[in-house]
Image (cartoon, rainbow, N blue to C red):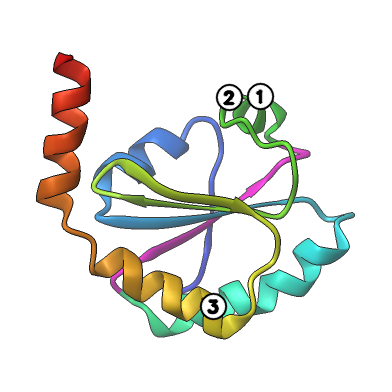
Amino acid sequence: MSTIELTESTFADTINDNDIVLVDWWASWCGPCRMFAPIFEEAASTHDDIVFAKVDTEAEQALAGAAGIQSIPTLMAFRENVLVFSQPGALPGHVLEDLIEQIRGLDMEKIHAEIAAQDAG
């Protein structure tokens, strides 16, 4: 599967409607973003069960601001509509692959219970 472009109008639905979504926040002038792009694309081509999405922070400044993006590239991972990872910086391919396996291995029942307990408290 190839990557998709997210906009302010498609972001929430994409996160809500998919089990795992990885979001690469980037800009065309950003050298580390350009270095990370082929790594992200390669992972997208080998993990059909995950949505790989990109947000151009120049074109989507309001969305980037709402997401609290302060440095690019930033990689965010959502699982079952929960932000489970957010970190600035380009990742090497093997680190991205390890991260994907960790996200797949999360006990989401436990995470949802923890969130519910925080919301109730």
Residue of label 2? 66
Residue of label 3? 95
Helix or strand or loop: what does disc 2 sit on?
helix
Residue in the picture at 19% in, 44% down? 111
Instruction: Give above or below for 104 relative to 114.
Output: below
Image coords of residue 34 (percent x, y)? 79, 68
Going by the numbered disc 1, the residue's amino acid type is Ala
How far apart marks 3 and 2 lie (CA) works out to: 27 Å
Instruction: Give above or below for 46 relative to 101.
Output: below
Q: Which residues are magenta?
A: 49-59
Instruction: Give above or below for 112 relative to 118.
Output: below
Circle 1 Cα neighbour tier, 10 Å, few/some/many (<14 / 14–19 / ≥20): few
Instruction: Give above or below for 86 relative to 40.
Output: above
Going by the numbered disc 2, the residue's amino acid type is Ala
Circle 3 Cα neighbour tier, 10 Å, few/some/many (<14 / 14–19 / ≥20): few
Q: Please give the label number shown on residue 62.
A: 1
Q: Would you say the residues marked 2 and 1 are in contact, meaning their CB atoms lie under 8 Å apart?
A: yes
Quarter in which the C terminus is drawn:
top left
Helix or strand or loop: what does disc 1 sit on?
helix
Quarter of the figure with residue 62: top right
Q: Is residue 48 magenta?
A: no
